[in-house]
Image (cartoon, grey):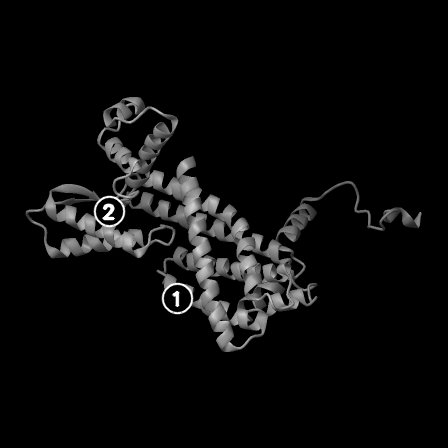
Amino acid sequence: MGNENFCPDCGQANKGDKITFKSFVYEMFNGFFNFEAKFWNTIIPLLTKPGKVSKDYITGKRQRYSNPFRFYLTVSILFFLILGFSKSLDKFKELKNGNTEDEVTQVDNNNLPKTDLDSLETRISKQLNKPWIPLDSVQKKKIIADALEKAKDTTQVINTDALNVSFGGDTRLDKFVTFQKKYPDIPIDDALDSLRYEKTLINRFLYNRGKVANLVITKKASREQFLNQLLSYGSIALFIFLPIFTLFLKLFYIRGKLTYVDHLVFVFHTQTVFFMLLSIYYLIDIFGIDPQLWIFAILFLVYLFLAIRKFYHQGIFKTLLKFVLLNFVYITISSIGVTIVLLLSFALY
């Protein structure tokens, strides 16, 4: 009779057949945030003591900390939720201000003061400098220069919220984009006949992508939808990217005794901090303060340097050299990854 309160096979306490709402919610969040104090035992030293949590974890002190992969997954989910809320808040502000369409500016070449040109340049630059727009500084300068040149040359409506994208200048896709923009209602086969291209599957596909490019370039709603898809694919790509980068980290410290999994633990922890800093950036933005992205970038680079030195126990010179080389490798691999994600998103949009 005394054993009825426990399972005869595993010894677990019998809690009855009924699941209460309280126990259901507790177990759900206990699994998600690992509520047995592990979440806070991990997040505080992870932010304030670079490299310590990773070092403790691989040396066997694991009971107090959350699993690195689970913790990374939790923080990344929270980051994307905050990012989504931030974008939704921006849309709400636009609706509140009655500003639901792309911003346009009517420009008159006969009476265009320099202050208007400066204002136009500032507005375009502000749009292009948003962190999720994947353009380098050279491309951004070219877009601004083209827009200002058009403003000087003729009286026209300039969309300061749109992007001007080139696929090489004189490629087949550029021709399709230009033609489709000029004649948006012509059927694909008729357009290919006019351009003297064969009606092959690849040409039809590229012409359709030209239509997509024009939508993304000119329509704010389409652009936001494309960026959402880009973020979705990017979050999935990270699960492939991080293990690949860890291989290079293993090569840089091949003489050490650390295993591939040890390096992977360190990578997951540093990437988690990266997401936490980005989350703080967007939270500050949500509260109406204009945060400076470069400050968060410097904070992360300093954190990363200190974490590498603590985790791998090497001198300042060796750590600095490998820090620079690893960042070069990271930027190279991530650039390739971003290009692949961009092409995939563009092809499937």
Q: Nearer the viewer, residue 45 or 91?
A: 45
Is residue 329 left or right of 149 when viewed as pictured? right
Furthest residue to the right?
1
> Is residue 266 placed above or below 347 in the rendered structure?
below
Disc 1 is placed on an element classified as: helix
**Mark 2 Cα-neighbour bin, 10 Å: few <14, some 14–19, many ≥20:** many
Location of residue 166 (image quadrant): top left
What's the residue at 37%, 42% (across, down)? 224
Residue name at image x 30 percent, y 38 percent = 219
Q: Position of residue 147 (x, y in %)?
A: 20, 48
Image coords of residue 148 (percent x, y): 17, 50
Q: Is residue 142 visible?
A: yes
Are the two marked residues, 2 and 1, in contact with CB atoms closer than 8 angstroms?
Answer: no
Image spot of residue 294 (x, y percent): 37, 64
Task: Indicate the position of residue 153 as horizontal and vertical percent values.
Answer: 11, 46
Location of mark 1 (residue): 295
Picture residue at 41% right of the left edge, 67% below the top: 298
Residue type of the residue flagged with mark 2: Thr
The residue that appears at 65% across and 65% down in the rendered structure is 57
Could one spot residue 349 in this view of the protein? no
The residue wearing badge 2 is 160
How far, Cα to Cα, is label 2 from label 1? Answer: 27 Å
Q: Is residue 206 above or below residue 166?
A: above
How packed mark 1 is, by other alpha carbons closer than 10 Å (few <14, some 14-19, many 20 or more), is few
| Numbered disc 2: secondary structure | loop
Task: Report the amino acid beneath label 1.
Answer: Ile
Task: Say whether disc 2 or disc 1 marks the residue closer to the N-terminus.
Answer: 2
